Image: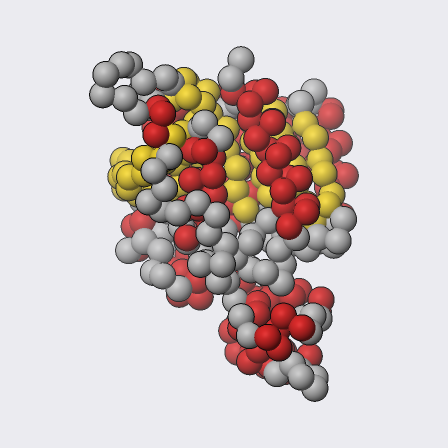
C-alpha cells in the first residue's frame, strides 16, 4: 500500500460503496465511477480502489506452512447439493500423533463471504486450529471450479449457484465434520457476511446437531424458524453497519421468545467487514480482536463440555 493511502483516510462513503459492490448491489462499473467523486487532492480514484481491495498477504496471521498445524484439502460428498464440496481442513499438530490415539477436538465450520474460499478465510481456519479446534473451511464454488484467485470473478461464479443446493452443501459438510474421527462430535459454525447469514441458517436446519454459532455481520434467519434453534448464538455486527444493526432487535426478540441462548454485540466505530484484516479500510483491529476472543470463549464453553 503506498504512502499516499496511509496518510489520507478513505472517506466512509467510499467504503460503503465498496460494501455495496461486493454484495452485488451495484455493478463493477458503477463502483469504479462512484469512487471518482471521492478523489480529492492527494488521493486519486485509483488509490482509493487500491486501498479498498483485499490484500491477502497483509491479512495473513498464520502461515500455510506453520509447523503447529496440519492442513489438507478434502472433498466431501453432497449428493442432494451440487454433488460434492471441497474445503480446507486444519488441525493442530498436537492432534496428530503416530504413537498414540489423537485427542478428539471440537469442530468449527468457517464460511467465507460471497466470493468463495479466499486466503483470508483459510487463514481464519488456521487460527482456529491454533486455538485447539479442528476447522473446515468449505468452498461454495467447488462445483464451478473453486475460488478462482480473484474476488470479483469469484462473486460472478457465486451468483450462478443454486441457493437451495448451496445450503445443502453446507449442511452436508457440517455433518461430515461432526462425524470425523478427529472431532469430539460437537461442532460450531462461524462465517462472514454471506457466511454469517449461512451460520444463522444452519442453526435452524441442524437443530441440536449444532452446538454453537458465531455469525459475523450476517443476515438473520427467519423469525418463524427461531424455534428450531438449539445452538448457542453469538452475534457480531459493526455499529456503523446500519441495515444489520436496525434488523437486530427483531432477531433478538425471536431468540428470546424461543429461549435460545444468545448474545449480540454492536462494535463501535466498526463497519461491515470490520473483522477482515485483508481489507484494511474496513478492518478495526481493536474490535476484531474483541470479537475473536468472544468467539473462542463462546465455542470453548459450548463445545468442550
Colour scheme: secondary structure
Q: Which residue does the image show at 36% across and 52% down from the upper left?
A: 141
Depicted 99 relative to depicted 288: above or below: above
Q: Hey, which quadrant is residue 47 in on the image?
A: bottom right
Please state which of residues 186 and 161 is positioned toward the viewer in this rendering: 186
> In this orientation, does residue 123 appear?
yes
> In this orientation, does residue 80 appear?
no
Q: Position of residue 178 (x, y in %)?
A: 39, 24
Q: Hey, which quadrant is residue 290 in on the image?
A: top right
Q: Residue furthest left?
A: 98
Q: Which residue does the image show at 59% across and 60% down from the upper left?
A: 280
Specify whether 160 is left or right of 6.
Answer: left
Specify whether 283 is left or right of 53.
Answer: right
Q: Position of residue 29 (x, y in %)?
A: 53, 78
Q: Position of residue 139 (x, y in %)?
A: 37, 47
Specify whether 241 is left or right of 27.
Answer: right
Q: Which residue does the image show at 64% across and 50% down from the upper left?
A: 285
Q: Hey, which quadrant is residue 218 in on the image?
A: top right
Amino acid at each position: 500500500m503506498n504512502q499516499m493511502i496511509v496518510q489520507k483516510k478513505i472517506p466512509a462513503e467510499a467504503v460503503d460503496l465498496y460494501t455495496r459492490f461486493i454484495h452485488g448491489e451495484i455493478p463493477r462499473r458503477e463502483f469504479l465511477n462512484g469512487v471518482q467523486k471521492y478523489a480529492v487532492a492527494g488521493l486519486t480514484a485509483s488509490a482509493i480502489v487500491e486501498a479498498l481491495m483485499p490484500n491477502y498477504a497483509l491479512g495473513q496471521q498464520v502461515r500455510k506452512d506453520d509447523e503447529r498445524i496440519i492442513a489438507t484439502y478434502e472433498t466431501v460428498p453432497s449428493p442432494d447439493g451440487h454433488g460434492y464440496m471441497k474445503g480446507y481442513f486444519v488441525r493442530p499438530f498436537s492432534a496428530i500423533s503416530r504413537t498414540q490415539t489423537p485427542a478428539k477436538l471440537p469442530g468449527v465450520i468457517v464460511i467465507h463471504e460471497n466470493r468463495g474460499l479466499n486466503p483470508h478465510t483459510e487463514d481464519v481456519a488456521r487460527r482456529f486450529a491454533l486455538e485447539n479446534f479442528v476447522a473446515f473451511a468449505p468452498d461454495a464454488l467447488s462445483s464451478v471450479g473453486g475460488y478462482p484467485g480473484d474476488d470479483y470473478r469469484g462473486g460472478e461464479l457465486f451468483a450462478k449457484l443454486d441457493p437451495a443446493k448451496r445450503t445443502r452443501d453446507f449442511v452436508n459438510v457440517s455433518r461430515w465434520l461432526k462425524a470425523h474421527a478427529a472431532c469430539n462430535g460437537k461442532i460450531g459454525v462461524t462465517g462472514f457476511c454471506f457466511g454469517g447469514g449461512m451460520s444463522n441458517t444452519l442453526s435452524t436446519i441442524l437443530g441440536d446437531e449444532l452446538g454453537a454459532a458465531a455469525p459475523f455481520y450476517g443476515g438473520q434467519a427467519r423469525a418463524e424458524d427461531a424455534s428450531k434453534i438449539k445452538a448457542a448464538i453469538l452475534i457480531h455486527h459493526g455499529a456503523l453497519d446500519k441495515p444489520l444493526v436496525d434488523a437486530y432487535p427483531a432477531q433478538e426478540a425471536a431468540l428470546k421468545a424461543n429461549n435460545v441462548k444468545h448474545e449480540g454485540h454492536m462494535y463501535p466505530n466498526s463497519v461491515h467487514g470490520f473483522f477482515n484484516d485483508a481489507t484494511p479500510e474496513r478492518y478495526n483491529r481493536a474490535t476484531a480482536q474483541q470479537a475473536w476472543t468472544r468467539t473462542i470463549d463462546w465455542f470453548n464453553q459450548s463445545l468442550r463440555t
